[in-house]
Amino acid sequence: MSGWYYDLEGACLYAECSQEWRNWSLLELIEATGVVPDLPELQKPDEYVSKLSGWVNRLNEIRERLRCSVCKQMMIPNYKYAKNLARYNMTVASCQSGEGHDQNIYLNHCWACREIIDSRESRIQVEKRYICIHCGSGPQKSDTYTQGDICPKCGARGMTGEGRSRLCSACNHSIRLPAAHHLTGPRSQRVRNLT
Ligand SMILES: [Zn+2]
Ligand SMILES: [Zn+2]
Ligand SMILES: [Zn+2]
């Protein structure tokens, strides 16, 4: 499937079924088949196409990470989350081979920098959220945590640096802080002044 043009041009919500089917996007496919996705979050006709296509895009990006790091088999999304994908906006998956293989792996896009958060590499949590290994963001609404407070790779406190780059003196991991309006917590103003 190709052509997520409504991301580029805002809401283009009318199907163009007259064009060659090869060029159809999800929008035309849904129109032509009359399929209505059976999810409570996807019942509004003017929302489900963009929500569903966003979900498909996201799954495609996440799919390559859905292999168990031990045996390389595809992991199975945990049912509780799969059922509520549209609501939770994330994936938790496990390898069927059980113990010793990847279990309860959390995969999501960082709300601040849009890179993928994979709990196999982003192991450090703040307020029960994995910190993004790329930009250091934690909970979106945190009023205690500011990006760079903790190294997302080793958990050491107080990354240092100038502009938007921060370095961990304990493990040498570096991050690039997200845009100023995505900074959280009490030290965000100070960080803004430095960037
Ligand atoms: Zn496995
Ligand atoms: Zn990030
Ligand atoms: Zn570190």
Image: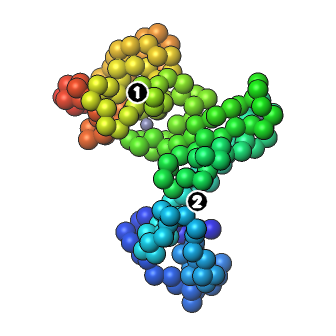
Please name whichever residue, 78 or 159, is drawn nearer the observer in this view of the structure: 78
- What residue is drawn where x is 55% and y is 52%? 84
Name the amino acid, label 2. Answer: Val
Q: Quadrant of residue 21?
A: bottom right
- Residue 137 at what x, y percent from top left? 39, 32
> Is 157 placed above or below 82 here?
above
Dot 1 or dot 2: first in sequence order is 2
Callout 2 crowding tier (Cα within 10 Å): few <14, some 14–19, many ≥20 = some
Instruction: Give the labeled residue for mark 2.
Output: 56
Callout 1 crowding tier (Cα within 10 Å): few <14, some 14–19, many ≥20 = few
- Callout 1: SS: loop
- Callout 2: SS: helix
Name the amino acid, label 1. Answer: Glu
Instruction: Give the labeled residue for mark 1.
Output: 127
- What residue is drawn where x is 40% and y is 27%? 127
- Residue 15 at what x, y percent from top left? 51, 82
